[in-house]
Image: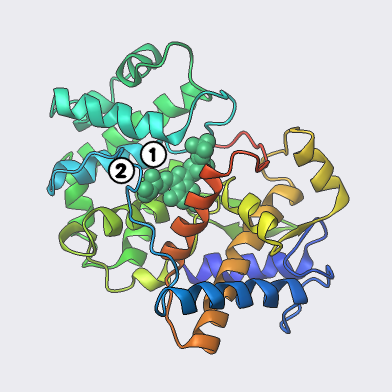
Amino acid sequence: MDEVRASSAWVVARASHVFVDSEGNSLSLSCSLAFWMLIFWIEKVVDNIKDSIPKVEWDFEKIHYFDGGPLTVQYLLVLDAINFCFWPDKDLSYDDFALGLKYALQKDKSALDADRLQKFTGPQLRELLKWPRPLPLEDERIRLLHEVGRELENSFGGKASNLVESCGNSAVKLVTLIARHFPGFRDHSVYKGHQVFFYKRAQIFAADLWGAFKGQGFGKFKDIASITIFADYIVPAVLRHLGVLRYGSSVASIIDADNEIGSGSEEEVELRACSIYAVEKMRELIKIKTGNKVLSVELDLWLWSFGIQCHSLQHHRTLSVYY
Ligand SMILES: Nc1nc2c(c(CN[C@H]3C=C[C@H](O)[C@@H]3O)cn2[C@@H]2O[C@H](COP(=O)(O)O)[C@@H](O)[C@H]2O)c(=O)[nH]1
């Protein structure tokens, strides 16, 4: 995850569309007014709730499958393999996928077996999710399900739990292994000739395990603090709302008009990289000012849960298989 942090900081230092500080002074290590105001606000919250930021429960929505065993691991890997780009259908959200896969498993424990994953078709996935029309990027979702099924079968005896067990309780190793085995999880971009890493779905899988299993068993990671936030389309909008991120006029007008931002464009990479950088800074400042060690995973869930409940927030729209 060092690569995610370092390459995000590299982008922030060269950004011209999205800024982490209120003056748009690119990478200013002395934090801006907006940033300190945010920290002040966080500190106020922290004071109010006995030295910790609001803890948002994993699965606060009560939508995920959980049985305490290996099938939950399979469920989360499959869910995170297709955890991207819901916005093109205004009625569709992440919840539909989490619930649809959960009901499928409750009905048939073998619904997400590796051999079944490899045979999925678009109409079957729709049927499983009880979704009445084609899904956004449906062909890509099917291709990625096939890829997960095939590689699980070839390298992990068909079981996502074997993959997790081979990581020696290291989230970093898990993300590395996932990126190595499943090309669909290799979430990166090239920005001004420089490779930038995000690994959003691979990291969220580690975080989901940690959250679902409450840091025990399949969710026990000695290095969960290494994970960054998951650069999606909700968290940047929340950071903008809080005043942590400021958008230049061209990005602001594209987003405010609900127009698309191209995948891999400078604007898109800056939105994601600045979000990661900003939250890492928040973590550092919380630690310096309060002594509290907050995980990016915790900050992410807090920001994300705020974002999905705040329907007026406008987020950026990029057709992507990564988030
Ligand atoms: N940063 C971040 N992004 C997240 C999640 C999650 C779900 N995490 C689950 C784990 C525990 C919780 O209880 C959650 O249920 C989804 N997303 C992203 O949001 C977008 C979907 O938005 P909408 O179209 O409104 O459904 C899409 O890019 C999706 O990839 C998260 O946690 N963090």
Q: Residue at x 69, y 65 (%)?
A: 244
Query: Please, what is the three-letter code of the amino acid marked with disc 2?
Result: Leu
> In the displayed structure, would residue 30 be above or below residue 266?
below
Would you call the spot at circle 2 few (<14 residues within 10 Å), some (14-19), or many (20 or more)? many
| Residue 315 disc label | none
Q: Is residue 299 left or right of residue 271?
A: left
Q: CA distance from mark 1 to mark 2?
A: 6 Å
Q: Which residue is mark 2?
A: 77
Q: Is residue 312 left or right of residue 111?
A: right
Q: Is residue 72 left or right of residue 280?
A: left
Q: Residue at x 39, y 78 (%)?
A: 50
Q: Which residue is mark 1?
A: 81
Name the outermost residue toward the front.
48
Q: Of helix, strand and loop, which one carries label 1?
A: helix
Q: Quadrant of residue 75?
A: top left
Q: Residue at x 43, y 38 (%)?
A: 83
Residue 44 lies, in percent from the top left, at 55, 76
Q: Of helix, strand and loop, which one carries label 2?
A: helix
> In the displayed structure, would residue 124 be above or below residue 165?
above
Labels in figure, total: 2
Would you call the spot at circle 1 few (<14 residues within 10 Å), some (14-19), or many (20 or more)? many
Query: Please, what is the three-letter code of the amino acid marked with disc 1?
Result: Ala
